[in-house]
Structure formats: structure tokens, C-alpha cells
Amino acid sequence: VVFDGRVQLAPPRSPPRAALSGAPPMSNTRLGPEVNRILFARNLPYKITGEELYELFGRFGAIRQVRLGTSKATRGTAFVVFEDIFDAKTAMEGLTGFKVGDRYLNVLYFKPSRVQERIEAAKDLEEVEELRRKHRLAV
């Protein structure tokens, strides 16, 4: 600020709230279409607990929910739902390749379109089987 021909320093401005919380400013940050609040973690140790996952992923922000795979087909996997999309992005970047026990984590964004594709494919297969039975066609 220039006052009476002399330079006068302006008082320091306080940083915006987003800068204080560590979150990137929403107006300037663009996220890709694949970025999601829901992360899919795989290659987890079979003996890991939900509490350990909360502790591991919770370092990156508030967690809404953790779903740990318990069946034979889903062991070693988990879904982690964050409250904030930026926390999920940071966790995905920070934990991919992170060693837990004797395994390296693989963390991905959840893709609901893939789940829907699998559901539709299963329905199509059921429909084909029903038509085969109805018309008594051999496979």
C-alpha cells in the first residue's frame, strides 16, 4: 500500500480456513472423474482387523465406514469410505504400495459402474439359462 508517497506494508492477512485445515481449496482444485470417497483396498493381511484399518486409513482423515472382506472370496480386501473426497485421494496416494505385515497394499477408487456391469451380466446369464430350459436346448 502506498500512503503519502511512502510505501507502507499492509497488515498480514489470516489464511483461509481451508488452508488452516490442510484441505485444498475447493474452488481451485479439480479432481478426475475416477476420484471417489470410497476406496477399495486389496492385498491386505488376512488377520487385519477393522480397528487396525481405521487406524491405518484414519491418519488421512475422517472415516465414515470400513467394510472388511470376511468370506473366502473376499479375504484380504476392504472398502473404506471417507467423509471427504480430498482425504480419500490423499489416502489412496499415500497407502498404495505401503507395506502392512508382509504385504504391499493396492488401493484403488471404487468403481460402481463395474459392479453394475457384473450384476447385469449375471442377469443376462440367468435369462439365457431360463430360455435354454424353456426351449429344451442342450448346451
Image (tube, rainbow, N blue to C red):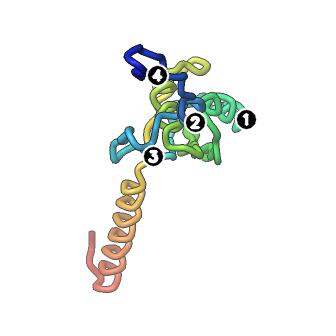
What residue is rendered at 55% in x and 44% in y? 84
Q: In the rendered image, which residue does mark 3 sit on?
A: 36
Q: Which residue in the structure is indicated by mark 2?
A: 17
Q: Which element type, helix, strand or loop, lies under badge 3? A: loop
Residue drawn at (26%, 78%), measured in percent from left and top? 137
Numbered tag placed on residue 97 in the rendering: 4
Image coords of residue 107 (percent x, y): 47, 33
Left/right placement of residue 51 relative to residue 66 reads right
Question: In what element is the residue under mark 4?
Answer: loop
Which numbered mark, 3 or 2, is in the foreground of this view?
Answer: 2
| CA neighbours of label 4 inside 10 A, class few (<14), some (14 to 19), many (20+) | few
Amino acid at the residue labelled 3: Asn
User: Distance between the Cα atoms at labels 1 and 4?
Assistant: 20 Å
Q: Which residue is mark 1?
A: 51
Residue neighbourhood size for the residue with mark 1, other residues' Cα within 10 Å, grouped as few (<14), some (14–19), many (≥20): few
Q: Nearer the viewer, residue 132 or 13?
A: 13
Crowdedness of circle 2 by 10 Å Cα count: few (<14), some, many (20+)? Answer: few
